[in-house]
Amino acid sequence: MATKKLVMVGNGMAGVRALEHLLKLAPDAYEITIFGAEPYPNYNRIMLSSVLAGGADIQEIVINDWDWYKENRIQLYAGHMVTRIDTKNRVVYSDQGAEAKYDVLIMATGSNPFMLPLPGADKEGVIAFRDIKDCEMMMETSKKHKKAVVIGGGLLGLEAARGLLHLGMDVSVVHIHPYLMERQLDETASRMLQRELEAQGMTFLLSKHSESIMGRKRVKELRFTDGTRVDADLIVMAVGIRPNVALAKSAGIEVNRGIVVNDYMETNIPGIYAVGECAEHRGIAYGLVAPLYEQGAVLAKRLAGVDTAGYAGSVTSTKLKVSGVDVFSAGHFAEPEGTRALRYQDEVEGVYKKIVIHDDRLVGAVLFGDTGDGSKLFSLMKSRESVKGREKELLLGFAVGAGASVSPEERLASLPDDEIICGCNGVTKETIKDAILNKNCTTVSSVKACTKASGSCGGCKPLVEGLVQLYAGDVAGEPVKEGICGCTTLNRDEIVAEISRMGLKSIKEVMNVLGWNNPEGCSKCRPSLNYYLGMLFPESYKDEKESRFTNERYHGNIQKDGTYSVVPRIYGGVTSPSELKKIAEVAEKFDVPMVKITGGQRIDLLGVKKEDLPKMWEELDMPSGYAYGKALRTVKTCVGSTFCRFGTQDSIGMGIRLEKELERLSTPAKVKLAVSGCPRNCAEATIKDFGVVAIDGGWELHVGGNGGVHVRATELLCVVKTEDEVVEWASAFIQYYREHAQWNERTSVWIERVGLDSVKKALEKKKDREALHARLKLALSTQKDPWKEILSDKELRKNFEPLPNAEPVKN
């Protein structure tokens, strides 16, 4: 049978999950093309709150990385917005000029955040909380402003508020209802949640109706209909979502609130399907991920030609961790007429439980603080079996016929194998049990990698942890241990020690010899191993480019529209008229949309097409500034004694010397330096990875600073007298960090983990510093400037050539 062309509009969780099912059922049936409006691979939108709160970075919430598309022969147009569908000729068109023919079209356009149509809503500083761009906006705003207001006291609003608190902002939550999360909690549970969140620092303005947003260019305050107001530098609207149906409507596809589909996710136009938040099934558009995955499973079977019952709708439950507090709700918890409710409340322990019963059947539940019985209660609701005589057991967790409470382990052991543990991904206890007992998945991370349990909202993680403890002890005979990722139980130190002991020389060899669960590795461990091997064997190891992230493969930061940035090296922030003239001429020649002075005293050429990168590097004829890499980024300087009347030392000369000593050095995470010419610290040296501050007759050396999301001041390493000593200590410190930090661990986090005293002890002897400096020099001797290397190698340069008739961000 001829391969059909399948095009999907949307690169989100629901649509890609459907394709994952399809690829398992019929891996060769379709030639697949995906259009995604964001310049990222498929990522977990539910985990954006964790990114905002500092619990994860962008790479950690990626579900399927760039390599997944390549491995499954999927053409991904990232950063392409589909603007038109020709249903007659079966072709879709994007705003970037790409087009694709289809036999089957899946609409997975998701939803848009609802923005209140308030006067002033178009002002700078008024945003939604829906995607990575919104997260980045909040992070940037928190560096310059203090007052944040979140409109919406639902789950999304509270998670946004928690993230903004973490970023150091004063946060007020505005809610139109008298209590929070009224769709998931009853008033008692809501009040308990409010007290917990107020203790964390949130302020709540309840029963408030927003009237207008004031300010000139940027928001300054939010006014309410009762005449009161609240100051605001940032307003985040988290008041709901609406199915994204504009494209479908313009193509003549039937639309109500969402794209109307039948039980097989078919629209009114043959060959066109819809799945996810954009779809409306039997009058309902679902916003929770579990029903959307159920829809995707039905659609995948339909497209694979596998017999399946249609999608009949979903009974939904919500099990969440709201700013560190566990909550669960399901069914008719608001006590509709004809029901009776049983409650248990412990204000000391912060536990509240309520079950709602109708005709001896469980129809609703709310749990706060202790959600261990949530899955069991939800299963009873779906089965509609009688609970007569078991009400006390259900409410309090008592065993039938016993007078004492059962342990969490006994609860888990008593759950039936078909019990759904991870509602987001539809993973049963039996599936997790099988992964632990038969697939050597003895950590939460490996269970997640194998089954996807706990891989979405994370609310079921305590249950997964419990099951690992319950079953892994019998299998492993030792305490469950977390590795660097779900592919292995080995940590960083164990891996590095084994690579050194056995002389392992390639990523494949490491994974094979050390018994990786996933023989291909993942987007977390492959870059880690690539770094560790390069650090241990700088002369013999050949860097594996495919194990690096996109930015490092193309030697430029990818931007939200799919273009790249070019940042040449400008040593110590010092340039010349001829160099500036050259940069300006190149920017004009290649129509660079924006030229920006960076915070590290360099010039950033933004908006460059991938195929133009080598030509620009060639004409600039300057070294790469490594603005994209886990390497030395910049050495920021003030003018020091060269011009400043307060300067005590030559900070410019010292900065340039350090930058030339350390440029091109591969490090576990990005490294930034600064040199201030006097204690006034104009170069902000005390929030850098390595900071140098001039004093009378010498230099203070500071380490472990960070000026990013997690601001951390440096700690004083030592005081030295000469410039040679500055270079010696800087080189020794950075090499010691290279050899002992985990991959992707900033010096600020590393110093907090190992302690400054341990670093001081390692560097106190001159012979040890000299040995570290020698190893650093050896590593540097193997490095070439990547821009010049690509320009001189025809094969490497081919990677930057555009594909015929297309311009995808990542292939």
Image (tube, rainbow, N blue to C red):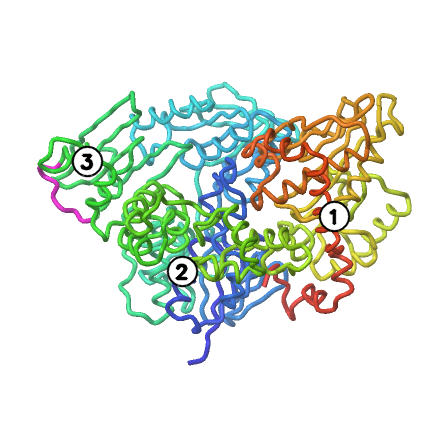
Give coordinates of residue 583: x percent, y percent. 83, 49
Q: Is residue 440 above or below residue 678?
A: below
Q: Nearer the viewer, mark 2 or mark 3?
A: 3
Residue named by callout 3: 406
The Cα–Cα distance between marks 2 and 3, rounded to whole angstroms, is: 39 Å
Along the line of sight, the residue nearer the viewer: 369 or 591: 369
Quarter of the view holding residue 412: top left
Q: Amino acid at mark 2?
A: Ala
Q: Nearer the viewer, residue 174 or 743?
A: 743
For the residue labelled by badge 2, is the local secondary structure a helix, a strand or a loop?
A: helix
N-terminal of the pair, mark 3 or mark 1, is 3
- On screen, residue 202 above or below 101: above
Residue 80 location in percent, x, y? 58, 57
- Do callouts 3 and 1 mark residues in contact (Cβ within 8 Å)? no
The residue beneath circle 2 is 18
Left or right: residue 100 versus residue 144 is left
- SS type, badge 3: loop
- The part of the image, by quadrant, that contains residue 199 is top left
Residue 385 in magenta stretch? yes
Start and end of the magenta stretch?
383-390
Decide whether the magenta segment is chiefly helix, strand or loop.
loop
